[in-house]
C-alpha cells in the first residue's frame, strides 16, 4: 500500500510545479507584473485587443484638459473589430462632440447608475469624486447642433456621469444640444447619469434602441423618440431634481420642461419610468414621420403641471397600465389632457391619480379614450364643482370599474360624443354622471 504521507507530498509537489509553470507563462507574456495591481483590477478585460484604455491615447481626466480628441482616437482604434474604451475615475472635459463607432462601448467605472446629488445636498459626492464623469463644454447657446455623444450601430455608452457645468443652479438654463443621440441599429445607453443636461437623449432615427438605468435631471427635454420603425425600449429611466431645486432653475424647468416626448415610434415599450417637476411628464405629438403606438407599464409623473398630454397618437393607440400620476402645481393642474387634435386611442388600466389637482382628465378630439379599474383620489381644488373627467369632442369614451374616492361630479360628458359607456363605478355617495345635452349612443351602469 502506498503511504498516505508520500501521496500528499507528491500531490503538493505537482501543484507547486503547475503554479510555477503558470506564473512563468504569465511572465513570458508580460502579464505577471500587472497581477494584483489596482489599475489591472479596476479595468475590465475581454478578449485580446478588445479593451482600450483612453489614457493610453492621451486622455488625462483632470477636469481641465480637453480630452475629446484623445477619446475619439481611442474609439476609432477600437472600431476596427469592436471593443471597449475604458475610462478610469476622473473628469474628462469634452470641448468637441464625440462619436461611438459601430460595435464600440465607452465604459466608465460605475457598475450601476450613480446618483450625484452633492450639488443639492451638502456632504454627498459630486461628479468625479467617486467615478467617471464627462464634462460637457461645447454647444452652448442653441438647441441645434450635434449631440455631445453620438452612439451608432451596436455601440453602447455605459457606467458614467454626464455633467454640464454651464447649466448652473442659480440661473435659467442656457440652451444646449442633446447630451446623447442614438443612431443606426441597436444603439444603447446603460447605467448612465445625465446629471443636468439641457436636453438628455435624442432617441430618433434608429432601430431597436435600448435606454436602461438612466437617471438625472434634464431641464428642457429628457428623452425624445421619433422615426422609429422597429421596436424601441426604455426601461428604468427616472428624472428627479437631484441636481438642484434652486427656484431660478427648478421653476423654469416646471414651466418649460418635458420629460418624455414621443413622435413616430412603432411598438414602443416603456417600463418603470418616472419624472418629477416638469410642465409635461409624457407628451405624444405628431411629427412629419407620424405618431406613436406603444405599451407603457409602471410609469409615473409626480408634481408635473400636466402628467400626460396627447396631441395625437396612432389608431391602435397607447396602452398605459399601472401608472401613477400626481399634479398640484401650475396654472391649471391636470393629470391627463387629450387634445382636440387627437384621433387615436388612449387606454388607462389599473392606474392611480391623486394629489390636490383641479381635474383628473380633460378629453377632446375624435379618438377613443378609456379608463378601466382606475383610482381617482382627489380633484376639484379649489372647490368649484369641476368634474374629475370632462369629455368633449366627437370621440368615444368608456369608464369602467373605477373608484372615485371623494364626493363630487365624477364625469361630465358633452353633447357631441359619438359614444359613451359608463359601468360599475363607485364613489362615497354613489357615482355622479352629468351629461350636457344629448350625447350619441350611451351605456350607463353606475
Image (cartoon, grey):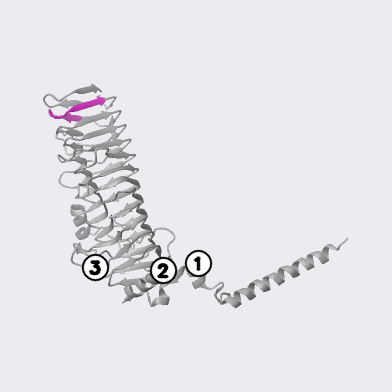
- Identify the residue at image location x=29%, y=50%: 228
Question: x and y percent of residue 172 in the render?
Answer: 18, 62
Question: x and y percent of residue 117 in the render?
Answer: 33, 60
Q: Which mark is residue 166?
A: 3
Relative to 266, 213 lies left or right: right
Dot placed on the residue nearer the N-terminal end, 2 or 1: 1
* Along the viewing direction, whichever of 121 and 149 lies nearer the viewer: 149
* Along the viewing direction, whichever of 67 and 332 lies nearer the viewer: 67
Q: Which residue is mark 2?
A: 80
The reply to whether dot 2 and dot 1 touch (C-beta < 8 Å) is no
- Distance Cα–Cα, label 2 vs label 3: 35 Å
- Distance Cα–Cα, label 3 vs label 1: 35 Å
Q: Which residues are magenta?
A: 411-422
Residue 153's quadrant in the figure?
Answer: bottom left
Q: Which mark is nearer the camera, 2 or 1?
A: 2
Q: Which mark is nearer the camera, 3 or 1?
A: 1
Residue 334's quadrant in the figure?
Answer: top left
Amino acid at each position: 500500500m502506498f503511504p498516505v504521507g508520500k501521496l500528499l507530498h507528491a500531490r503538493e509537489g505537482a501543484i507547486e510545479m503547475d503554479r510555477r509553470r503558470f506564473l512563468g507563462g504569465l511572465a513570458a507574456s508580460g502579464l505577471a507584473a500587472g497581477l494584483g495591481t489596482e489599475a489591472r483590477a479596476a479595468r475590465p478585460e475581454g478578449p485580446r485587443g478588445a479593451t482600450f484604455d483612453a489614457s493610453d491615447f492621451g486622455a488625462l481626466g483632470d477636469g481641465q484638459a480637453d480630452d475629446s480628441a484623445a477619446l475619439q482616437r481611442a474609439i476609432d482604434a477600437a472600431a476596427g473589430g469592436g471593443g471597449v474604451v475604458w475610462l478610469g475615475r476622473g473628469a474628462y472635459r469634452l470641448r468637441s462632440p464625440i462619436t461611438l463607432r459601430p460595435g464600440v462601448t465607452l465604459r466608465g467605472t460605475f457598475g450601476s447608475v450613480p446618483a450625484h446629488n452633492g450639488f443639492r445636498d451638502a456632504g454627498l459626492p459630486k461628479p468625479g469624486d467617486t467615478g467617471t464623469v464627462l464634462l460637457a463644454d461645447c454647444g452652448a447657446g442653441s438647441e441645434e447642433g450635434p449631440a455631445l455623444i453620438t452612439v451608432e450601430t451596436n455601440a453602447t455608452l455605459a457606467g458614467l456621469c454626464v455633467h454640464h457645468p454651464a447649466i448652473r443652479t442659480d440661473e435659467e438654463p442656457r440652451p444646449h444640444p442633446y447630451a446623447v443621440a442614438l443612431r443606426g441599429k441597436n444603439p444603447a445607453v446603460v447605467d448612465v447619469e445625465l446629471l443636468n443636461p439641457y436636453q438628455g437623449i435624442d432617441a430618433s432615427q434608429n432601430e431597436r434602441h435600448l435606454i436602461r438605468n438612466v437617471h438625472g435631471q434634464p431641464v428642457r427635454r429628457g428623452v425624445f423618440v421619433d422615426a422609429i420603425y422597429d421596436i424601441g425600449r426604455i426601461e428604468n429611466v427616472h428624472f428627479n431634481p437631484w441636481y438642484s431645486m434652486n427656484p431660478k432653475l427648478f421653476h423654469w424647468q416646471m414651466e418649460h420642461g418635458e420629460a418624455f416626448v414621443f413622435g413616430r415610434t412603432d411598438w414602443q415599450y416603456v417600463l418603470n419610468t418616472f419624472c418629477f417637476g416638469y410642465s409635461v411628464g409624457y407628451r405624444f405629438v405628431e411629427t412629419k414621420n407620424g405618431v406613436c403606438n406603444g405599451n407603457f407599464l409602471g410609469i409615473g409623473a409626480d408634481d408635473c403641471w400636466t402628467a400626460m398630454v396627447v396631441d395625437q397618437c396612432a389608431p391602435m393607440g397607447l396602452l398605459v397600465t399601472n401608472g401613477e400620476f400626481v399634479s398640484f402645481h401650475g396654472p391649471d393642474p391636470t393629470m391627463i389632457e387629450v387634445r382636440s387634435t387627437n384621433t387615436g386611442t388612449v387606454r388607462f388600466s389599473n392606474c392611480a391619480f391623486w394629489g390636490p389637482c383641479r381635474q383628473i382628465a380633460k378629453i377632446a378630439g375624435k379618438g377613443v379614450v378609456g379608463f378601466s379599474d382606475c383610482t381617482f383620489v382627489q380633484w376639484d381644488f379649489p372647490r368649484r364643482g369641476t368634474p374629475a373627467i370632462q369629455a368633449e369632442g366627437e370621440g368615444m369614451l368608456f369608464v369602467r370599474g373605477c373608484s372615485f374616492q371623494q364626493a363630487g361630479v365624477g364625469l361630465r360628458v358633452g353633447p357631441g360624443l359619438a359614444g359613451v359607456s359608463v359601468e360599475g363605478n363607485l364613489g362615497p355617495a354613489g357615482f355622479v354622471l352629468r351629461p350636457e345635452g344629448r350625447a350619441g349612443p350611451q351605456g350607463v351602469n353606475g
